[in-house]
């Protein structure tokens, strides 16, 4: 069902995808991890090398997440993807409180559906307006570059909040964007990128 919906709509949400044991290990070291990330983030902003509204932290700083990433393959997208896709990148992304999303409506590529798929796993609870993910279902099947904002506004889009551990899988050929983060803390996510081989 997950794979079918991903191919049809370009997006699917899965509650509790991150194993509870991994989530607990992350929670145990979250404060220190985020303190280290904040120091690097602020230094990068001062040096002009880092955007102030989001930050990607190397997974080597979060070994429990790196161990989890090292153990997965494309079968998490569905058994049909196991032989065709490979994990090509994994990032711990922090999105700071900000009245606008850090990216506008966009597609990551225009090569057609099913080439690149991302899995966004919330590491903190995310409510609507606190950095939730937005996607135009079915837009991955249309190839009309340059009108992403129009597509989102005219076709309507879905918002995907979720509890920590919830995943959103999406075809990056579809129109998508992060929402604004009006919450009090940075949104914390594990972002996995898969590509067809």
Image (cartoon, grey):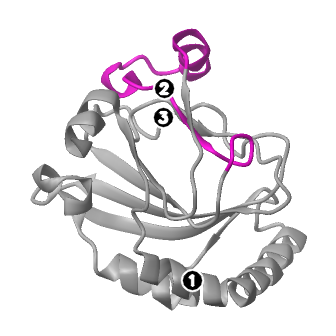
- From the viewer's perspective, is the residue at label 1 or at label 2 nearer? 1
Q: Earlier in the sequence, mark 3 or mark 2?
A: 3
Secondary structure beneath dot 1 equals helix
Is residue 196 found inside the magenta-colored segment of the image? no
Which label was assigned to residue 107?
A: 3
Q: Earlier in the sequence, mark 1 or mark 2?
A: 1
Question: Image height check: is 91 above or below 176?
Answer: below
Secondary structure beneath dot 2 equals loop
Q: Position of residue 67 (x, y in %)?
A: 39, 86
- From the viewer's perspective, is the residue at label 1 or at label 3 nearer? 1
Who's the residue at 62% across and 15% down the image?
A: 153
Who's the residue at 73% across and 90% down the image?
A: 32
Q: Which residues are magenta?
A: 127-156
Q: Position of residue 80 (x, y in %)?
A: 11, 50
Q: Nearer the viewer, residue 188 or 16?
A: 16
Is residue 152 found inside the magenta-colored segment of the image? yes
Q: Cα distance, mark 3 to mark 2?
A: 11 Å
Image quarter where the C terminus lies is: bottom left
Who's the residue at 20% across and 36% down the image?
A: 4
* Residue located beneath label 2 in the image: 136
Secondary structure beneath dot 3 equals loop
Q: Cα distance, mark 1 to mark 2?
A: 31 Å
Who's the residue at 53% across and 16% down the image?
A: 151
The residue carrying pointer 2 sits among few (fewer than 14), some (14 to 19) or many (20 or more) residues within 10 Å by Cα, namely many
Q: Earlier in the sequence, mark 1 or mark 3?
A: 1
Question: Image height check: is 20 above or below 163?
Answer: below
User: Is the Cβ of the residue at disc 3 closer than 8 Å to that at disc 2?
Assistant: no
* Residue located beneath label 1 in the image: 26
Q: Dividing the picture into quarters, in which one does residue 11 lie?
A: top left
Q: Dividing the picture into quarters, in which one does residue 62 lie?
A: bottom right
């Amino acid at each position: 069902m997950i794979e079918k919906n991903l191919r049809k709509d370009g997006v699917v949400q899965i509650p509790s995808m991150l194993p509870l044991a991994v989530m607990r290990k992350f929670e145990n070291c979250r404060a220190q991890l985020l303190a280290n990330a904040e120091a690097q983030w602020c230094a990068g902003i001062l040096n002009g090398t880092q955007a102030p509204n989001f930050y990607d932290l190397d997974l080597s700083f979060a070994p429990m997440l790196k161990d989890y990433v090292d153990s997965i393959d494309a079968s998490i997208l569905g058994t049909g993807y196991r032989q065709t896709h490979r994990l090509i990148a994994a990032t711990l992304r922090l999105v700071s409180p900000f009245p606008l999303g850090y990216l506008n409506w966009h597609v990551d590529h225009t090569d057609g559906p099913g080439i690149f798929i991302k899995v966004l796993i919330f590491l903190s609870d995310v409510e609507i307006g606190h950095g939730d993910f937005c996607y135009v279902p079915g837009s991955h099947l249309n190839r009309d570059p340059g009108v992403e904002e129009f597509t989102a506004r005219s076709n309507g889009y879905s918002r995907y909040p979720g509890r920590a551990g919830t995943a959103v899988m999406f075809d990056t050929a579809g129109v998508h964007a992060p929402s604004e983060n009006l919450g009090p803390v940075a949104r914390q996510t594990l972002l996995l990128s898969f590509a067809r081989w």
